[in-house]
Every structure is written in structure tokens, then in C-alpha cells.
Amino acid sequence: MYQKLDESKSTSLLGKYIKVFLVVTLYWIISILTVFVNKHLLSSDTVSLEAPLFVTWFQCVVSAVICFIASLLGRHFPSLVNFPEGNPLDTCTFRKMMPLSVLFILTVGANNLCLKYVGVAFYYVGRSLTTVFNMVFTYVLLRQKTSTSSIVCCLLIVAGFMLGVNQESQTLTFSLQGTIFGILGSLALALYSIQTKKSLQYVNQEVWLLSYYNNLYSSLLFLPLIILNGELEAIITYKSLYEFWFIFIMLAGGLCGFAIGFVTTLQIKVTSPLTHTISGTAKACAQTVIATHWYQDKKSFLWWASNAIVLLASAAYTKVKQLEMQRQHRSSGIGQKV
């Protein structure tokens, strides 16, 4: 009897490990694919469309449409599709979600502009200051103190970033404009992460409802920005606008944009936020190696050292925050018992 129970537990544990492995693998594939597809859309000679905000807007539209279809299926076939109920046309919801949507368009817009001007290999380092800005805004806006260990990790990230910029500036692929967009994207993402926690209460903590509203409202907000950025003429005069290959790759980019949100949530669900962060850090390392081989970029030892510093310091920061949370949890538990 005990042998059967042990075998059952082993089989259950093996199944769990296989599930985690498959989900993490799926996250890696989709995340890396999304970066390469977006890079191709934004700066390849094949596409050659000078309208980065239009590309970003299209991806928001695709995600919003998918969520809309899922909401319809959820209403008519609740046994097959489980999608939270909500009304994006509610003026109260629109007003409450607007700050998040503004930060969202700043984040994805700046990130895509960064990717347009810098190489995929440098993309992670170019956007590596998110953790630093997150620490700063957490203190400034939420008045939460930061430990010395966390500050040291952030200082190492800044050092790795500066070394990476210094080494990248010695190559032909360096773009000061792209680097600035990377910094702005990191800043916007840090604010977006803080605002997301606040906005979740307006949608009953439903992540998919948040994504639906966010992409829909952002699709509307991007339209005047596309016009102000002077992209309208480039779109209208683009010769391949209605060609199959262009529509196909635009849809592929939109599906990747939606899929990355799905697999990110899925990975956190089947593992943990800490594992997700570690997985993302390891994925960034693999992405950098793949990019240097794919584009045949030869990098110096110090360039690789900057990547290693940023990756290790980011992983160390995540570990430090996890240990701090565990200590806070234990101390609160002791306080409740007393």
C-alpha cells in the first residue's frame, strides 16, 4: 500500500516538473521570438516602414481584438472559455484606467523605439535600469525603505549598464537615440509596474480584464501620437501595406505581443514570481548569445562582462528581495502569535 502511494506521489511530482519545464520552455521561445519579430518589423530592410508607433498600435489592436473575442465566447460558452466579465465602455472604468494606459503606451512605445535603433544583443542591457528605477520610485512614491543589499545590487546594475554603453559605443551598431529610449522605457516600465498593482483593484484583480482594457484604451491613445510623429504619410505611401507578406508578419507580431502576456502570466502561475524573474534573466542571457550569432556580431570581453554584471546583479537583487519578504512574513507571523 505504501509503495503504491510513493509511486503515485512520484508520478504526480514528475508530471508537475514536466509541466513547469514545458511552460518555461514555451515562455523562452515566445519571448525570444517576439523580440526578433519586432526587430524585423521595426528596422529590417525587408519591411522598411518608418512607422514604429503604427507597428506598436497594431499589436495593441490585435491583443484587444483577441480579448474581445474571448469575452464574447466566455459569455456564450462559459463552459469552454473562462473570461472575466467587464464593460470597457464604462466611463468610470475608463477614467480610473487612463493613468495605467498612458504609462503602457509610454512603456511599449519607448521599448519598441529602443529595439528599432539598437541591436537585439544590446537590447537587454539597454533596458536594464528598470530594477533601479523601480527601487527609486518605490521609495519616492510609496515611501518604502530599501535595504543596503538592494542598493548595492542596483549600483552594480548601473555599473554594468554604463560599461555596456561604453563598449557598445565603440561598435558600428551603437545608437545614442536607442539607448535614451531604452532608459525612458525602463523608467516608464517601473512606473507602470507600480500603477498596475493599484489598477488591479478596479478590475477585481483580474489580469486578463486589465489586459483587455489596457490594450483597447491604448489603441485609441496611440492614434494621435501616430499623427503627431508624422507616420501617417509613411503609412499611406507604403507600397506593401496591403501585400500578404506584410499583413502576415504584422499579424505575427500582434499574436506574439498577445502571447507573451499570456505565457508570462502562465509561467508565474505554475511557478512563482521569483522563478519567473530568474527565468527571464536566464532567457535574456540566451537571447543575447543567439542574437550575436544570428547577426554575426563580434563583441569584446568587456562587452560580455557588462552583460554578466547586469544579469548577475539583477538575479542577486531578486534573491535579496525574496529573502526580505520571507523575513517580513516570519516576523508578521510571530507578531500575530504573540
Image (cartoon, rainbow, N blue to C red):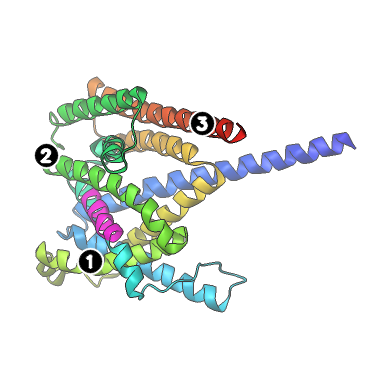
Side of 230 where 325 appears, left or right: right
Rendered location of residue 48, percent (x, y) = 17, 57
Q: Residues within 10 Å of mark 3 (few under 14, many from 20)?
A: few
Question: Overall secondary structure of the magenta stretch?
Answer: helix
For residue 122, above or below residue 195:
above
| Magenta-colored span | 99-111
Q: Residue drawn 45% across and 49% down? A: 264
Q: Reading the chain from its start, which is encountered first: label 1 or label 3?
A: 1
Q: Residue drawn 28% across and 47% down? A: 191
- As measured in the structure, the alpha-carbon distance from the residue carrying label 1 to the one carrying label 3 is 40 Å
Queried whether the magenta region covers residue 102, the answer comes back as: yes
Circle 3: residue type? Gln
Q: Secondary structure at mark 2?
A: helix
Q: Secondary structure at mark 1?
A: helix
Rendered location of residue 256, percent (x, y) = 38, 56
Q: Quadrant of residue 62?
A: bottom left
Side of 81 where 191 appears, left or right: left
Rendered location of residue 326, percent (x, y) = 51, 31
Q: Residue drawn 24% across and 33% down? A: 297
Pointer 2: what residue? Answer: 176
Can you tell which of label 1 and label 3 is closer to the viewer?
Answer: 3
Marks 1,3: beta carbons within 8 A: no
Most distant residue in the top direction: 301
